[in-house]
Image (spheres, rainbow, N blue to C red):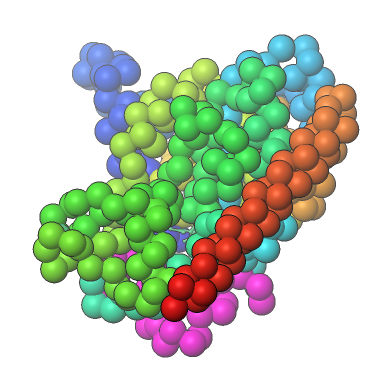
Amino acid sequence: MSSEKDKGKKPLADKVENDHEDSDEEASGTSNFSLEFLGRYLANKLKIHSDDTPKEKILEEFTIDGIVSHINKSNCKNIIIMAGAGISTSAGIPDFRSPVSGLYHNLQKYNLPHPQAIFELSFFHENPRPFFELAKELYPGSFKPTICHYFVKLLDDKGMLLRHYTQNIDTLERVAGVPDEKLVEAHGTFNQGHCLTCRKAYSQDWMKDQIFSNHIPPICEVCPGVVKPDIVFFGENLPEKFHKSITTDFSKCELLIIMGSSLTVQPFASLIDRAPDSCPRLLINREKAGHHSGLSLFGYGGGFEFDHDRNTRDVCWLGDCDDGCLALADKLGWGDELKELCKKEHERIDKEEAETKTIKKEETTKKTTKL
Ligand code: OAD
Ligand code: ZN
């Protein structure tokens, strides 16, 4: 995973590498290797198009209504969602980069060389404590999924979800019932952990127990190595499932929805350029993100084209993710179903939590009576 510092490096390398099989004969059969050809060749390789290529308009209008009309007309069965921390803020989990409330603006107590160091492997080797202290605050189990998470679940129930790619490590998609095969946790999760030395696997419960009993950092049971949750740190590779899934999913994508992400971390951010030209892309976010940077390679470039005359398919809906999902669900005729699902599931989670608390209380009482 790489940050804004080296934005562009990894995805470029990734794409050129992954697309090698596609059309190499096009390059080798050309003797007039002009700059123009190089531009076209790279654009083909990178699946991006020239600024001046006339393009067919995909959406009737660049609004949620345009997206709904596309869904209804083309009977979409292959929707991909790309999500970031913004889909979990209404659950009470801070995002990373929002001014004031973002996690990276609130880490002073850890005395880090810079905020992102908390997720950097090199710093973790030096001092793992800040990460585990933060993990206590963010640990899954204390938060409930949001309307957004249940919107994804509903899309799957309706047979319309091809895949949900999330950068989040809070596991709320799983809690909402999105099945494992539909889920790509691109930056890993707290779900499992490994010893950094011998790679022995540890369960979420084991790590939670260690972290909350202040055994920080948790130490492996068979060697002196530190056990780290399988969260992808800066400097680590993304999971194999991510790389496998992107090679087949995006060419099939009929609608791409991006929610609650600043689209600043690579290679995740540049996935938006993998959707075919015919695929509409909807951003639901508090701020514009991922738009065409203005930078281009021989006149070619990636990113959303919200504000461009040449836009054929990009919609930017600015506001809270939950409201955006509700607006979309309402227009699709599923608004009440979504609200009902969220209410029912929250009641279920509350009930289960209350039961667990009662059991724990009873166990503590039994222990103290015995003493
Ligand atoms: P960011 O914090 O970078 O971006 C969150 C985006 O969501 C911002 O554009 C916010 O404006 C927007 N936002 C916040 N709350 C919202 C809401 N309720 N409704 C709509 N929009 C909202 O988070 P990510 O893009 O997810 O890595 O960050 C990517 C990666 O950077 C993370 O996965 C993390 C971090 O380093 C790891 O945890 C390993
Ligand atoms: Zn070990």
At 77% from the left and 12% from the top, the residue drawn is: 73
Tell which quarter ligand 2 is in.
bottom left
Say which quarter of the image contains residue 98.
bottom right
Residue 318 coordinates in the image, percent (x, y)? 78, 50
Residue 142, can we see it?
no
Q: Is residue 139 left or right of residue 29?
A: right
The quarter of the image holding the C terminus is bottom left
In the rendered structure, which segment of residues is drawn in magenta?
A: 100-124
At 36% from the left and 34% from the top, the residue drawn is: 241
Q: Is residue 39 left or right of residue 58?
A: left
- Furthest-front residue in view? 370
> Quick one: 177 or 348, which is closer to the camera?
348
Against 107, is 345 above or below? above
Q: How many marks?
A: 0
Check residue 22 for magenta coloring: no
Residue 225 coordinates in the image, percent (x, y)? 17, 65
> Quick one: 227 or 293, which is closer to the camera?
227
The dominant secondary structure in magenta is: helix
At 59% from the left and 66% from the top, the residue drawn is: 361
Say which quarter of the image contains residue 117.
bottom left
Q: Is residue 370 left or right of residue 216?
A: right
Residue 44 coordinates in the image, percent (x, y)? 41, 25
Say which quarter of the image contains residue 217.
bottom left
Residue 267 coordinates in the image, percent (x, y)? 41, 46
At 34% from the left and 46% from the top, the residue drawn is: 238
> Quick one: 49 or 96, which is closer to the camera?
96
Check residue 104 for magenta coloring: yes
> Quick one: 244 or 339, which is closer to the camera?
339
Residue 359, can we see it?
yes
Against 21, is 52 above or below? below
